[in-house]
Amino acid sequence: MITNPPFALFDLEGLSPKTLNDLLQQAYDGSTVYHWEWYLATADYDAAPKRKPDGTRSSDATKAPIDPSFSSPFVRKSLADVAQWLRNKPKSVNVDPRYFGVLDKQAKTAGKVVLCRLEDPKSEKDGAACVLSEAAQSALYLDGLPSNLDWDEWVQSHRYRPDV
């Protein structure tokens, strides 16, 4: 039974469906638990994973292959826009409210995912701390939080600002 919500993934670069599929598959293969952990965010919340009464979730994250017509509504958006999407999500939407991923130029050229944490999910400020991760380890890192990874220590030595 999976109890943690999936993590929202925001494509800020307008990556091709093939590239998005490759990144999602790498994250799945590297997860070691073989769960789809990323939800490829869309502009509205209708397609987002929904909270279940017992707190569990099934296979409600985005699975590869995605619809070939997918087009990200977040192209050239900022971290502030992404943070606003997370802050405005209805209570019924079941994605992690604090940790999320961003796909920037590094995703396209190097197979990387930017892992981010809102410093204060309830604040309207653009406070997000980010680090760069291989796509294959991205879900594994976030799925292990906070138990086996000290986020603050990691960010201190690996802080990254998305390249959009």
Image (cartoon, helix red, strand yellow):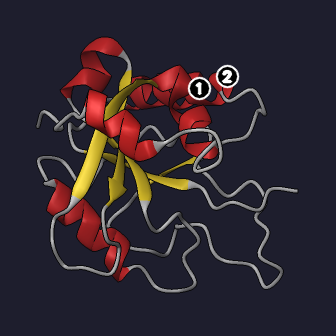
Q: Which mark is residue 2?
A: none
Question: In the image, 127: left or right of 24?
Answer: left
Q: Residue furthest top?
A: 110
Query: The C terminus appears in which quarter of the rendering?
Result: top left
Rendered position, 90 above or below 79: below
Determine the secondary structure under disc 2.
helix
Residue under the point 36% across and 23% down:
112
Residue under the point 32% across and 38% down:
155
Q: Are marks 2 and 1 in contact (CB under 8 Å)?
A: yes
Residue 65 seen from this side:
no
Determine the secondary structure under disc 1.
helix
Q: Position of residue 129 (x, y in %)?
A: 27, 49
Look at label 2 and name its amino acid.
Asp
Q: Distance between the Cα atoms at labels 2 and 1?
A: 6 Å
The front one of 68 and 6 is: 6
Residue that mark 2 sits on: 29
**Which quadrant of the figure has residue 158?**
top left
Q: Position of residue 73 (x, y in %)?
A: 25, 56
The front one of 26 and 70 is: 26
Q: Position of residue 104 (x, y in %)?
A: 23, 33
Question: In the image, 84: left or right of 29?
Answer: left
The front one of 82 and 99 is: 99
Residue that mark 1 sits on: 25
Residue under the point 15% across and 72% down:
125
Look at label 1 and name its amino acid.
Gln
Query: The N terminus appears in which quarter of the rendering?
Result: bottom right
**Which quadrant of the figure has residue 36?**
top right
Residue under the point 56% across and 22% down:
26
